[in-house]
Amino acid sequence: MTDSTPPALRDTRNGFLELDERSRLEFLLEFANDLPPLPPHYAEHEDELERVEECQSPVFIIVDVNNDVVTVHATAPLEAPTTRGFASILVHGLTGLASQAVLDCPEDFPLTLGLTKIVSPLRLRGLSGMLWRIKRQVAEKSVAG
Amino acid sequence: MTIPIDNTPKFQAYAHPEVIVSTEWLADHLGTPGLVVVESDEDVLLYEVGHISGAAKIDWHTDLNDAVVRDYIDGHGFQELMNRHGISRDDTIVIYGDNKNWWATYALWVFKLFGHPDVRLLDGGREKWIAEGRAITTDVAPVTEGSYPLVARNDENIRAFRDDVVAHLGKPLIDVRSPEEYSGERTHMPNYPQEGALRGGHIPGALSVPWARAVSEDGTYKSRAELETLYLTDAGLQKGDDVIAYCRIGERSSHSWFALKYLLGFETVRNYDGSWTEWGSLVRAPIALGTEPGRS
């Protein structure tokens, strides 16, 4: 069976898996620090963003699909670095892809990063929630577009 | 050696002033031999962002909970954890954390399950320390492997299981969740949907005292007089009562447990860590709906 994980996310996964557990947390923190700010038109209208209910911290996402190219935006507070890290992984890994490539991303991607033991399954549900909400928005916006 | 207690007047009015310290006290005592600072957060990466110099990181999921069974680590696990952080049995531990010390009080409660003699809470936690512009660092200080003794966990005095709660019905129970969870409108805390239960409501007879009422805006505990108004005058607890506190998984109720046990001096207070995620999913467990305690 072929792995339908988008190439950038595959690289991210390999990046995590080749590190020891302590370094994986630091790698996740690098993602957290690298979450791009919202573009001004969304920063001024955060109410248009969708809250990821599966996350304990307030994280909001919105997806643009233009000419079948996906852009993912997300925002989460600085005091919630784990959530920011998760959001950043998906923002960097899914932005620029065709919508079908995003929809094909396996649902269990969050569980393949080698974080289950050091971050805990409960917290990883937040990442799963983000992924499926992004996919749902992509599906809706692709049809609408 | 003994680390002096914090003589802040607010603390002196508490039943056990020896278990709580101010940010100022900690800043003055950092680096004292025999003093170990522990950070315990909801967010598993927050410590990596920056922590009080020399602090050890202890995470509730990955360090304190058993990896398989819904339970805490056993004596061997605790011994290993303490040794990894170079903590000795006679060390003074000061715990702090995010989210107004939810996880810090939870960790403190677990330290007490193992009877660690001197564990104190940093009043106001991480948020207050940072708000005051006090130093944090990303450096992790090297530790020398400790030689903590093997101590069996003792659940009897401060932990309640569901059968204990059943036997306790009719005696004071404190539900520290939000009013919406208490009344049964929600089966989970606002914004925490993944820790749900199959049914909503509260344990019959439980009094609603949301945890946050015990703290001020800056996350510090309220004064003894204010806490007495909250728990005694308003909620109706009486001195000498045998009390069980619960929330959804036992962390917010650790925060209230700490206030009842150490600040007000209730001798017998237990934390029901199974809490609503267990009770609200138990077949045929009695449940009351609405804003009144209901009859047990």
Image (cartoon, coloured by chain):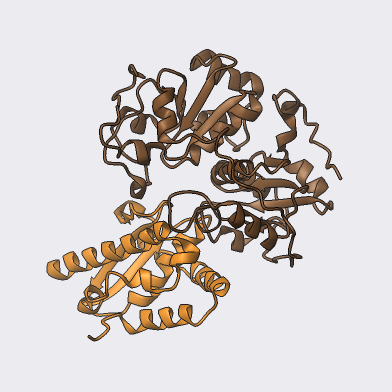
Chain colours: A orange, B brown
Against B195, residue B263 (above or below) is above
Q: Would you say A80 lies left or right of A42 here?
A: right
Please give the count of numbered marks on the rendered protein. 0
- Foreground: B259 or B242? B242
Q: Position of residue B141 (x, y in %)?
A: 73, 65
| Quarter residue A112 falls in | bottom left
**Is residue A125 shown left or right of residue B100?**
left
Residue furthest to the right in view is B1
**Residue A97 as seen in the image, left or right of residue B235:** left
The x, y position of residue B88, in whole percent, is 75, 53
B143 left or right of B106? Answer: right
Query: Percent from the top left, x then y, of residue B245?
Result: 48, 30
Indicate the position of residue A92 as horizontal and vertical percent values: 39, 75
Instruction: Give me the residue at 73% from left, 39% from top.
Output: B22
Residue at point 37% right, 63% down? A127
Query: Quick one: quadrant of the N terminus of chain A?
Result: bottom left
In this rendering, does residue B131 appear at all?
A: no
Task: Classify the position of the C terminus of chain A by image quarter.
Answer: bottom left
Q: Is residue B5 visible?
A: yes
Compared to A142, does B69 lie above or below? above
**Relative depth, front residue between B289 and A144:** B289
Quick check: B287 above or below B31? above
- Residue at image x 60%, y 52%? B75
Task: Name the residue located 73 percent from the left edge and 38 percent from the top edge.
Answer: B21
